Amino acid sequence: MSASEELAWSVDPHSSEKSIEELRRALAAFNLATASIDQSRELGAFIHAAQGRLVGGVLGLLWGQCLETRYLWVEGRLRGQG
């Protein structure tokens, strides 16, 4: 691609499986080549209240210098407090 090449965005609320898979493959190939994603590992951090009751946490994937958040949950009464 040259600097003068024109690009066009399109937004499709009904994206085809083919387009989605093509994007995923391209991203995975880039990440493997540049960010050591093949050496990834899962990471979890948890918040517990008294008696060990779970009140929040985050689960993600650590790869390269990135943390990809997959799940984030905080008990309702604790939300909105910064």
Image: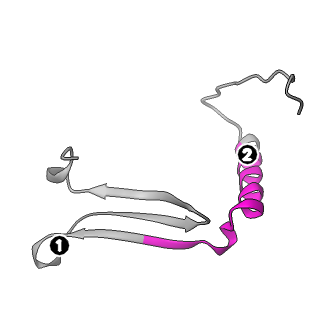
**Residue drawn at x 47%, y 57% as measured from the top left:** 69
Relative height, residue 55 to residue 3 (above, below): below
Above or below residue 69? Residue 62 is below
> Quick check: 5 left or right of 14?
right
Q: Residues within 10 Å of mark 1 (few under 14, many from 20)?
A: few
Q: Is residue 81 left or right of residue 27?
A: left
Towards the viewer: 46 or 82: 82
Q: Amino acid at mark 1?
A: Arg
User: Which residue reaches farthest right?
Assistant: 2
* Amino acid bearing label 2: Leu
15 versus 75 height, above or below: above
Q: How many marks?
A: 2
Q: Position of residue 13 (x, y in %)?
A: 60, 29
Residue at image position (26%, 56%) is 74
Drawn side of residue 71 relative to residue 78, left or right: right
- Which is nearer the eye, 22 or 2? 2
In the visual, does 38 lie left or right of 53? right
Furthest residue in direction left, as rendered: 50
| Residue 34 x %, y % | 74, 60
- Residue at 89 percent across and 30 percent down: it is 2
Whichever of callouts 2 and 1 sits on the residue coming sooner in the sequence is 2
Res 73 label: none
Q: Main secondary structure of the magenta part?
A: helix
Disc 1: which residue: 53
Q: How is the image coloured?
A: one colour
Q: Which residues are magenta?
A: 20-43
Q: Looking at the figure, which quarter contains the N terminus?
A: top right
State the image quarter where residue 80 is shown: top left
Secondary structure beneath label 1: loop
The residue under label 2 is 23
